[in-house]
């Protein structure tokens, strides 16, 4: 996908343009969802630099590339450009396969895990939380009054699975670093 040259100064008054749409405010749920997916992608870049395991890094790189497709999908809601890539069931199945792969090496848990550990663990926990925020913002956008919007429902499924994957990846990193999982208990004050 080719990018046009930057539109310097066009957003100075709080508005932006999405693919095939008129001007929208940067405070819209569409802008919030796109921005949070971008924030998540930057966080994945940070995680990539902190993680040592080559396979995890490879998985993160693929996810980072897929998040550009997800962002395009959110921005192209009127389907004005039909030749742009979209999130498909193939993307979701890939995330599900990764979840299963990471879960296989982990013991089952029965309590919440406190997000404390080495930086490679905590950055993935942050990515999980930002992913969940992106998911909530996308729901708000999809449920807004914009009846002419044609959203790809697979974008929500992708974000939902991705949040699960970050949790399992974080646990895997914790196990690999020999750092114990810290479980939350309501009995502790």
Image: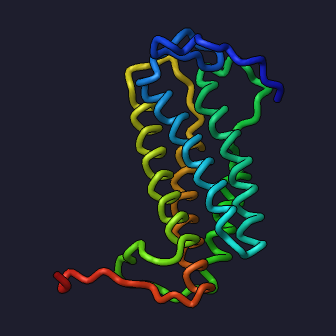
Q: Quadrant of residue 37?
A: top right
In what quadrant of the picture does the C terminus appear?
Answer: bottom left
Identity of the residue drawn at 35% across and 83% down: 183
Residue 119 falls left or right of residue 88: left
Identity of the residue drawn at 60% across and 27% down: 75
What's the colour scheme? rainbow
| 13, 168: nearer the viewer | 13
Percent position (x, y) of residue 71? 63, 36
Q: Taking 51 as reference, is 19 above or below it?
A: above
Q: Quadrant of residue 144?
A: top left
Q: Taking 69 as reference, is 99 above or below it?
A: below
Percent position (x, y) of residue 62? 75, 55
Identity of the residue drawn at 53% across and 10% down: 23
| 93, 169: nearer the viewer | 169
Percent position (x, y) of residue 69? 70, 39
Identity of the residue drawn at 71% across and 74% down: 52
Q: Taking 82 as reference, is 160 above or below it?
A: below
């Amino acid at each position: 996908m080719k990018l046009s040259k930057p539109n310097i100064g066009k957003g100075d008054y709080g508005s932006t343009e999405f693919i095939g749409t008129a001007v929208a405010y940067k405070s819209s749920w569409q802008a919030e969802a796109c921005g949070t997916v971008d924030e998540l992608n930057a966080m994945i870049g940070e995680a990539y630099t902190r993680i040592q395991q080559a396979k995890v890094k490879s998985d993160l790189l693929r996810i980072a590339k897929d998040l550009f497709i997800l962002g395009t999908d959110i921005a192209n809601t009127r389907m004005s450009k039909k030749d742009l890539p979209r999130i498909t069931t193939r993307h979701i199945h890939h995330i599900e396969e990764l979840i299963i792969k990471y879960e296989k090496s982990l013991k089952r848990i029965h309590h919440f895990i406190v997000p404390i550990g080495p930086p490679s663990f905590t950055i993935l926990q942050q990515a999980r939380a930002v992913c969940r925020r992106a998911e909530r913002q996308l729901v708000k956008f999809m449920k807004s009054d914009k009846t002419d919007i044609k959203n790809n429902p697979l974008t929500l499924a992708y974000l939902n699975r991705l949040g699960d994957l970050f949790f399992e990846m974080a646990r895997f990193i914790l196990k690999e670093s020999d750092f114990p999982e810290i479980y939350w208990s309501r009995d502790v004050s």
